[in-house]
Image: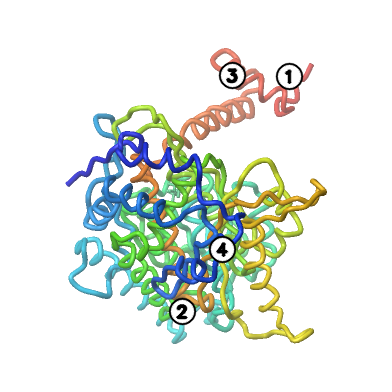
Amino acid sequence: MTTVGKDLDRLATHARLQEMAKSPYDLTAPNSLTPERIASYRCRAAGIDLLYATQRVDEPTLDTLQLLADESGVINQFLAMKKGAVLNRIEGYESENRQVLHTACRDIFHPPAQAPEASKQATDELAKLRDFLTELDDNLLLNDKGEPFTDMIQVGIGGSDLGPRALYIGLAAHLLPNRRVHFISNVDPDDAHAVLQELDLSRTLVNVVSKSGSTLETLTNEELVRTAYSKAGLDPNHYFLAVTGTGSPMDNPDRYLRSFYMFDYIGGRYSATSMVGLVMLGFAVGYDAVIEILLGANDMDRAAEEPEIRKNPALLLALFCVWNHNFLGSETMAVLPYSQALLRFPAHLQQCEMESNGKSISREGEPLRYDSGPIIWGEPGTNGQHAFYQLIHQGTTIVPAEFIGFRKSQYSQDIMIKETTSQDKLLANLLAQSLALATGQKNDNPNKRFSGNRPNSIIIADRLTPYSLGALLALYESRIVMQGFLWNINSFDQEGVQLGKNLANRLLTHLAGRRKDPSYHGGDTDLAGWAMLKAAGLMDDEQE
Ligand code: G6Q
């Protein structure tokens, strides 16, 4: 089953939106943000509210965005994806040619599953995980000295690190007693050293996560950590777990205490709800919390099937991105969580969005005639307010923003000062920023003038919990793939990272060659690479 899309600029609605973009809704006009508008420009799914009165849209724009969604068949493509269509492909060219079934990992609550085989594989892995966690909880699985494990190191990079790490930090308030997780991702040896030096290795499990089982950074770090265990007199095979693709070079259960699997049809950056994230999260927050994450994600996945844009937050967010980016001309987008626990969520979204949608050819291999994915960036508020918000408010570039907040704090440990809690202060700031960006401020002094009309949305839920975090993750995953459908690009491969990897390997060949044989000269075959090594001072004896 394959699904072919249509280029954005070949849709009839494209020209209509271009026309509308000449005079978008003016948020600075008197009475533009009426209480009725604020109350009604709101959409809810899986416990998450999306407030969008501060976007530059009105009823005619929304109606036309609805037509755009219908005409591009975005929801049909989303449904096809969930049922196992081969969407990771470029028509007529060599490509990964795979299904895209991360949603199947959580389609386990409402049988029959949409992609039954994939959901069955997810359920089987979950059962293995539950057994493993029960052994740990019941002290049936102990270290060589008969003590329980208290720590875990996750070794992985990219999709095998960012999403899982963002979720772990997001759920630190839910940690089981005496459980902590640490991450080693960078091949920078200092990253590993900093983690290893503070741990009692004898009570630490190591979860090596690599779908391909062949990633340089991860394999290097695995060896580094294995060496540390051996030096400490510990047998690494009694401490190391693997999460990998079936048949990968890491699929070697003899080397690991346990092996868990993820599958070809789950892309790295979409893999946080596969074993890539769940083994570590199960250790940290327990199996029940893992199920809650999956439930939240599945509820949002189901809500994302809704064809009416006003009832589908993922689709609305995707359409606002296209509206702001392709029609109103913004180049970047800020994700601004008003929650310290979401510290690494923007970093995860950066990968998810930019690796997925940083493309310049269509699914037919043709150069795009319009922009695809924006640059994504962000930091938690209110800290960001004291850093880069100046540019968002008064800079020459318009940065559409997405604020994320929660009505209640995670720990409920708060202080009342001047009749308001810290949580009140946090949320008042979030709402104030949204209003300030939208409405701006007139002033005779140009230095104190705010132009306004800076579009933004608010995503708000009751509290950051395993359920709401699962729903939030799925909200973003779905909006990112929907944007890809609207742009008619393949959001599921990442050929753009290959060239740098290949060149790094070539440079490593030179370094190794020189280390083995001082007369080795790589400049014969690689003038530029060799010259770069010399200029950087990595070929000391060749310095002029
Ligand atoms: C994500 C990418 C990439 C990948 C890493 C790690 O979609 O494919 O970030 O996750 O390169 O790959 P492995 O899991 O195979 O080590």
Q: How far across and how far down the image is residue 190, in percent?
A: 68, 51
- What residue is at 63 percent from the left and 57 percent from the top? 439
Is residue 12 shown above or below 224?
above
The image shows residue 512 at horizontal and vertical percentages of 59, 30
| Among the 4 quarters of the image, the one containing residue 513 | top right
Left-right relation of 293 to 1:
right
**Mark found first going from the N terminus, 1 or 3:** 3
Instruction: Say above or below: 232 vs 371.
Output: below
Give yes or no for contact between labels 1 and 4 (Cβ–Cβ under 8 Å): no
In this figure, which residue is indicated by the disc labeled 3? 522
Q: Please name the residue shown 28% across and 38% down the image.
A: 6
Q: Could you say which is closer to the camera, residue 370 or residue 412?
A: 370
Mark 4 residue type: Leu
Element carrying mark 2: loop
Give the residue pinned by disc 4: 33
Mark number, residue 283: none
For the residues labelled 1 and 4, the Cα–Cα distance comes to 67 Å
Judge depth for marks 1 and 2 and give the one in front.
2
